[in-house]
Image (tube, helix red, strand yellow):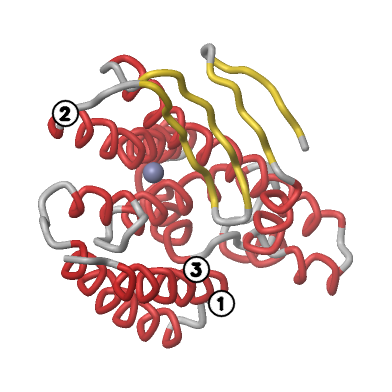
């Protein structure tokens, strides 16, 4: 377990967090190809993933704390991150602000990453790179050299920053409890049963899309959420 404090917020990082990041960042591909560039790519993805998930959770934690949500701490684990609050009281408006601050922080990082592309590269190349970066989690360095000669592996970091912050922020806004979109919906849907039902139906749609796109990790996440929402639905009283 790795622990530190940032902006007065205690953060815990579980080993599982790094393993999942390494997997999404192409860890198996790196082991297979055994090239230093591929390992570098995985490392850069893990860095980008860590910075992005931490910024997302800090968005929740600091907004909640500023609006009277009590003491806060953050845990990064296999399923991304969690921001905890204890001892405070938030009304619905402040709670909504706290929920949206997570994906909001991610979208700000996405905008900064895309703007960096336009600072580093001429506009047409920046645009082409943006499209590639949004399509691929990590373009393997050899492949990147075919598209963009004279490339450097370090651009893999920007690639991961663009991909992670755009897609994970959008994915987080999907109305599936306990994702941010689901928690936002929970503020407005009075019936718990209906809230879980909407989550289950949305999960099924997302799972079908992810099967088509062969996104293994996302598929596991949403299948797990479908299960937890089904359990929640069965236990809900109203
Ligand atoms: Zn969140």
Beta carbon at label 2 within 8 Å of ligand 1: no
Name the residue tied to disc 1. Answer: 216
- Tell us which disc is closer to us: 1 or 3: 3
Residue at 16% of width from left, 69% of height from top?
Answer: 194
**SS at badge 2:** loop
Question: What SS does tag 1 mark?
Answer: helix
Q: Looking at the picture, how far across and down is residue 192, in whole percent?
A: 20, 62
x, y (%) of residue 52?
Answer: 51, 39
Which of the 4 image quarters holds residue 112? top left
Q: Nearer the viewer, residue 47 or 192?
A: 192
| Residue nearest the observer in this picture, 118 or 45 | 45
- Work out how far the residue at label 1 is from the one at label 3, CA to CA, in angstroms: 9 Å
Q: Label 1: how many residues lie within 10 Å, few (<14), some (14-19) or many (20+)?
A: few
- Looking at the rendered structure, the secondary structure element under dot 3 is helix
Q: Earlier in the sequence, mark 1 or mark 3?
A: 1
In front: label 1 or label 2: 2
**Distance Cα–Cα, label 1 vs label 2:** 38 Å
Is 220 situated above or below 84? Answer: below
Q: In terms of sequence position, does the residue under pointer 2 or pointer 3 come before the other? A: 2
Write the residue at 37% across / 31% down.
Answer: 60
According to the picture, the residue beneath numbered tag 3 turns out to be: 221
Of the image marks 1 and 2, the number of the one nearer the N terminus: 2
Quadrant location of the C terminus in the rendered image: bottom left
Give the left or right position of residue 19, taking residue 32 as reference: left
Residue drawn at point x = 58 percent, y = 17 percent: 6
Asked if ligand 1 lies within 8 A of label 3, the reply is: no
Residue corresponding to mark 2: 91
Q: Residues within 10 Å of mark 3 (few under 14, many from 20)?
A: some
């Amino acid at each position: 377990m790795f622990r530190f404090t940032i902006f007065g917020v205690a953060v815990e990082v579980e080993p599982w967090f790094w393993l999942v990041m390494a997997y999404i960042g192409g860890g198996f591909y790196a082991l297979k190809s055994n090239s230093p560039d591929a390992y570098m790519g995985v490392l850069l993805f893990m860095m980008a993933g860590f910075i992005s998930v931490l910024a997302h959770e800090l968005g929740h934690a600091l907004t909640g704390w500023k609006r009277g949500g009590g003491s806060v701490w953050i845990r990064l684990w296999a399923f991304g991150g969690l921001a905890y609050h204890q001892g405070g009281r938030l009304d619905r408006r402040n709670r909504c602000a706290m929920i949206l601050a997570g994906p909001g922080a991610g979208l700000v990082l996405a905008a900064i990453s895309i703007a960096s592309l336009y600072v580093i590269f001429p506009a047409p190349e920046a645009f082409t790179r943006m499209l590639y970066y949004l399509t691929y989690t990590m373009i393997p360095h050899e492949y990147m050299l075919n598209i963009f000669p004279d490339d450097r592996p370090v651009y893999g970091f920007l690639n991961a920053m663009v991909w992670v912050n755009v897609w994970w922020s959008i994915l987080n806004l999907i109305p599936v409890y306990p994702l941010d979109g689901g928690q936002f919906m929970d503020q407005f849907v009075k019936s718990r049963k209906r809230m879980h039902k909407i989550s289950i139906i949305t999960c099924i749609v997302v799972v079908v899309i992810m099967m088509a796109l062969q996104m293994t990790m996302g598929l596991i996440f949403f299948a797990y959420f479908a299960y937890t929402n089904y359990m929640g639905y069965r236990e809900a009283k109203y």
